[in-house]
Amino acid sequence: MKLIVNRSIGVVASRMFAAFLAISGMAEAGFAAQVAPSNTSNSVSASPPPLVSPQPAAGAGSAAPPVAPAPAEPAQTAAEVAGFRSALFGMVEADVRAAITKDFAVGADGVRVSQNGAEHTQVLSIKASDALPEGGGAEVSYVLGYKTKKLIQVSVSWSKATDDKLTPERLVSNADTLHAYFMAAGYKPDTIVNNVAV
């Protein structure tokens, strides 16, 4: 999965991040995240070769002892997509509904159910005033897979439809906050697409 970080206001207003808020570990907002060691076989850059002192030509005197290889760098940790708050990917609908109630105190009557006709997926959507601290009202949508019927995606979007007091400045501030967080979160560089219209 690629993390797409985009600060474009049009993207923020319509669909800020599709499934990517789920990666966050922001304690204030309660985003769920796990950290796991990087898989060295998928590493982007290999370790540098060990440094060895050049050997003098034959008969040029005694050879200097070789320089020891540089110590291995400690394994870096990479963020792993786990879910959004207490809703974890792979949960069935009943568990997602329980997570929604726990995270946002929304009852069954506050969950809007719809179908995505193109993808044949079911979407559970709620209005949330605290998806991002001081971020304004948002819509959080939980997407259940067509065949699996399990949570496969979480989208959070801000717009005038979710909060009539939302200003362009607040949208940009939300985007900047999330952009800064995700860029510093420790994701592998080859899994990030930055500032690209989606």
Image (tube, grey):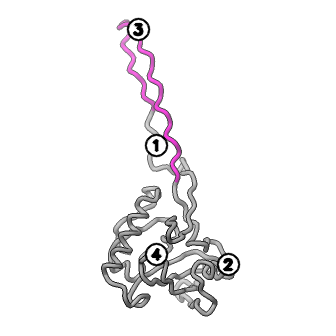
Q: Which residue is mark 2?
A: 95
Residue positioned 58% across, 91% down in the render: 110
In the rendered structure, which amino acid carries the disc numbered 1? Ala
Query: Label 3 neighbourhood size at 10 Å, few (<14), some (14-19), many (20+)?
Result: few
Query: Label 4 neighbourhood size at 10 Å, few (<14), some (14-19), many (20+)?
Result: many
Residue 185 at what x, y percent from top left? Answer: 46, 59
Q: Which residue is mark 3?
A: 62
At numbered mark 4, what does the secondary structure look like: helix, strand or loop?
Answer: loop
Please give left or right for residue 86 compared with residue 13 in the image.
Answer: right
Q: Nearer the viewer, residue 156 or 31?
A: 31
Residue 46: give its label. Answer: 1
Q: Are discs 2 and 1 less than 8 Å apart at CB?
A: no
Q: Relative to 34, does residue 62 appear above or below in the rendering?
A: above
In the rendered structure, which amino acid carries the disc numbered 2? Asp
Q: Are discs 3 and 1 less than 8 Å apart at CB?
A: no
Q: Does label 2 or label 3 sit earlier along the sequence?
A: 3
Q: Relative to 63, does residue 182 appear above or below in the rendering?
A: below
In the rendered structure, which amino acid carries the disc numbered 3? Ser
**In this view, which residue lies farthest toward the bottom?**
109
